[in-house]
Amino acid sequence: DIQLTQSPSFLSASVGDRVTITCRASQGISNSLAWFQQKPGRAPNLLIYRASTLQSGVPSRFSGSASGTEFTLTISSLQPEDFVTYYCLQFNNYPYTFGRGTKLEIK
Amino acid sequence: EVQLVESGGGLVQPGGSLRLSCSASGFRFSSYWMSWVRQAPGKGLEWVADMSQDGIRKYYVDSVRGRFTISRDNAKESVDLQMSSLKADDTAVYYCAREGETGTLDHWGQGILVTVSS
């Protein structure tokens, strides 16, 4: 199975900060990586697909990039509603696998 | 508007069975792969299974293969997850999700809780 190493697990930041979350795949997955945001008690919401394409309706402060097997989610200027949990997902190989998540906390 | 609504969850004893159902609306259901994803209490997300549009191709995570069966009824626009030989580790919120043109899970249901306990 492909392992996704997501870091950091917890991230403390302030409103207006720029933050980056990273997922490293254990082997090549092309650009078959997505990023999700999950608010407490809610289903995940797709933010980015194909590593860098912004899902319709998602604010432009979210962006994704890739370099080899390393993928990053960047939030350019944190808003209060962004302090929730984020997951990456690879859908290149079965079984699909998620990263362990990053919880974004207010400093 | 795409809508996915899960049903069938609840409390079941270890070794028991349960059938989850996901009812879809707002899109051409027969054109999309469908997935099930679960999340144990306080834990991360785990992809469980998916199925092709025609129901022929099915894939499972190792931890459920042989115990869970995914199926669909395109006429009724629903996808089911039959779960048997349930274990405490299967306790989770189960989500159904559509695999869209994005290539990934672009719409999710609200989730349904399955609790395996004596």
Image (cartoon, coloured by chain):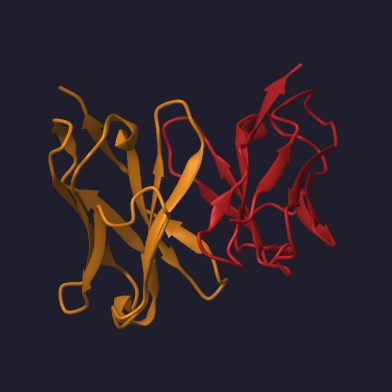
Above or below, A72 against B27 in this view is above
Above or below, A70 against B27 in this view is above
* In this rendering, position of residue A18 left or right of residue B116: right
In the rendered image, which quarter contains the N terminus of chain A? bottom right
Q: Position of residue B20 (x, y in %)?
A: 20, 51
Kindly tell me whether residue B110 is visible in this rendering.
no
Above or below, A18 against B31 in this view is above
Q: How many marks?
A: 0
Q: Position of residue B46 (x, y in %)?
A: 47, 46
Residue drawn at (34%, 33%), measured in percent from left and top?
Answer: B89
Q: Colour of chain A?
A: red
* In this rendering, position of residue A8 left or right of residue A97: right
Q: Which chain appears orange? A: B
A92 or A14: which is nearer to us? Answer: A92
B78 or B55: which is nearer to us? Answer: B55
* In this rendering, position of residue A94 left or right of residue A64: left
Residue drawn at (30%, 33%), measured in percent from left and top?
Answer: B91
Q: Position of residue B85 (x, y in %)?
A: 19, 43
Kindly tell me whether residue A82 is visible in this rendering.
yes
* In this rendering, position of residue B90 left or right of residue B80: right
A20 or B26: which is nearer to us? Answer: A20
Q: Quarter-wise, where is residue A79 in the image? A: top right
Q: Quarter-wise, where is residue A75 in the image? A: top right
A52 or B42: which is nearer to us? Answer: B42
Residue drawn at (62%, 44%), measured in percent from left and top?
Answer: A99
In the rendered image, which quarter contains the C terminus of chain A? top right
Q: Position of residue B62 (x, y in %)?
A: 42, 53
Return the residue found at the far top. A107
Residue drawn at (51%, 36%), measured in percent from left and top?
Answer: B44
Q: Quarter-wise, where is residue A30 in the image? A: bottom right
